[in-house]
Amino acid sequence: MSTTILELIYMASAAGFILALKWMSSPATARRGVLAGEVGMLLAVVGTLLRFEVVDYTWIFAAFLLGSAIGVPLAYKMPMTAVPQRTAISHAFGALAAALIGVAEFYRVTPDRFTMAALSMEVLLGFLTFTASLMAFGKLQEILPTRPITYIGQNVVNLGVLGLAILLGMVLVFDPTQTWLFPVFSLLALTFGVMLIIPIGGADMPTVIALLNSYAGLSASAMGFALDNKLLIVAGALDGSSGFILAVIMCKAMNRSFANVLFGAFGQVQTGTAAKVEARPVRSASHEEAADILGSAQSVVIIPGYGMAVAQAQHKVRELYDSLTRRGVDVRFAIHPVAGRMPGHMNVLLAEANIPYDRLFEMDEINAEFAQVDVALVIGANDVVNPAARNDPASPIAGMPILNADHARTVMVIKRGMSVGFAGIDNELYTMDKTLMLFGDAKGFVAGIVKELSAVHA
Ligand code: NAP
């Protein structure tokens, strides 16, 4: 195929990736964004397969079959709530592929200095991302202990291993003929990936995955320089920068610094405040009472959280929305940036249930209005409405911005019991005088309310 046509295919592919990122930034255009990304990827694969360097398709076809045999069940079998670990395992594969291509390229030709610099970066980031992503997958899937494992001098040891790997990479840049150094360099990168994740707790893992996404992208970009492939440079840079921006957004939403995520030990279960909150009584209510209160309210703000995702209650929530709206109740949804287990988790679920986008409000848009809201209906959310973030400087979530559900006139919380959320701490919202606990599975309880509302209506 002529180089010009290939360049055009690659350019269209890069445009697909850029448009995908642009459109995915709003729920209204997100589906289009996914499609643009898919078309971009298809063009990238087709363009690459048509390159004149490809002399035999046998191995490519075998790899295609093997990859599909792993990828297709992975996509269908893993539930939405397991997306963070699914993302981690995909990064592990992607990063391994980039690193192995770097290794092959190193042994295929003796690289010049510039290529060697790109190869060193590619292999270092690729291998460390591979093992770090596998570790992150293991922790999120609870195959490995989720608690942070720390020891004195850990940061010094970790930085020492990374420093040594970088040093060897630089020596190779100046003298690529020292081939014996390359396996040591690779081994150090693999080891650093494991050591990087050991001190990080399960709660910080989704943020770390966003960061690993960034590393995998940078590795692919470096591969683009090593192989002189412009599309890889562009796609890798987009992946690298978007992963980094996402990690920053997540850190901000949880009020945590990068250094704290990477070197801290957040995520351990706190037992100190638990006793204090549990000792206080809670008021609970039935479907009928909840339906009565909601049906006579003027404004309701629904706050979905991880429990709604677990219960797959979004379609029932849509029915509740319809039922209340028909009665003239103003129903809005308040979305916390880290509600659930991945950024945009709630938006995806509510979009799936066709909740109108203009009813979804970001935390900053709606927080000041809670004082005028009749009912804040919390569905399976916990940490993102925990006033301890504001009131208790000793809390592990101190300073994290939360949704002001406690400012509403009445608060109703649907959850199965008094269990803690992701951060492992109790929630004083449940014991406030204005709070009614609606104990039950989110889907079942919302269905019960909808039934009551329609019975009253009929
Ligand atoms: P959460 O604090 O994890 O609480 C979820 C609550 O849902 C639990 O207390 C649980 O209580 C309840 N629940 C579970 N299954 C349920 C079911 N079937 N029906 C009804 N309730 C159910 O959730 P969140 O408020 O959404 O907060 C998210 C947390 O994840 C934050 O700490 C955030 O920092 C962290 N995080 C999020 C992201 C992200 O990108 N979204 C990334 C990293 C960390 P019961 O067991 O009593 O029912």
Image (spheres, grey):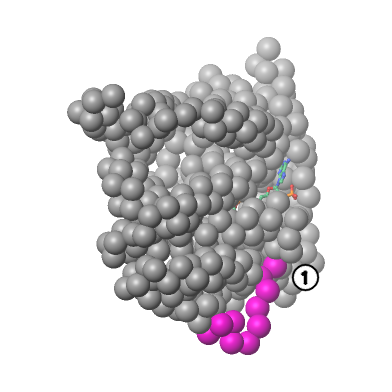
**Between 284 and 398, which is closer to the camera in this rendering?**
398
**Most frequent secondary structure within the magenta stretch:** loop
Verify whether residue 154 appears in magenta: yes
**Farthest residue, direction top:** 458
Residue 175 x, y percent position in the rendering: 35, 72
Answer with the quarter of the image where residue 43 lies.
top left
User: Which quadrant of the rendered structure holds the C terminus?
Assistant: top right
Q: Is residue 85 visible?
A: yes
Verify whether residue 342 appears in magenta: no
**Between 51 and 251, which is closer to the camera in this rendering?**
51
User: Which quadrant of the rendered structure holds the N terminus?
Assistant: top left
Residue 279 x, y percent position in the rendering: 79, 67
Q: Is residue 276 visible?
A: no
Residue 59 x, y percent position in the rendering: 54, 33
Three-letter amino acid code at the position of disc 1? Ala
Answer with the quarter of the image where residue 61 lies.
top right
Residues shaded magenta: 147-157
Residue 353 x, y percent position in the rendering: 56, 25
| Residue in view at x 70 percent, y 36 percent | 311
Mark 1, residue position? 275
Q: State whether residue 263 is above or below residue 326.
A: below
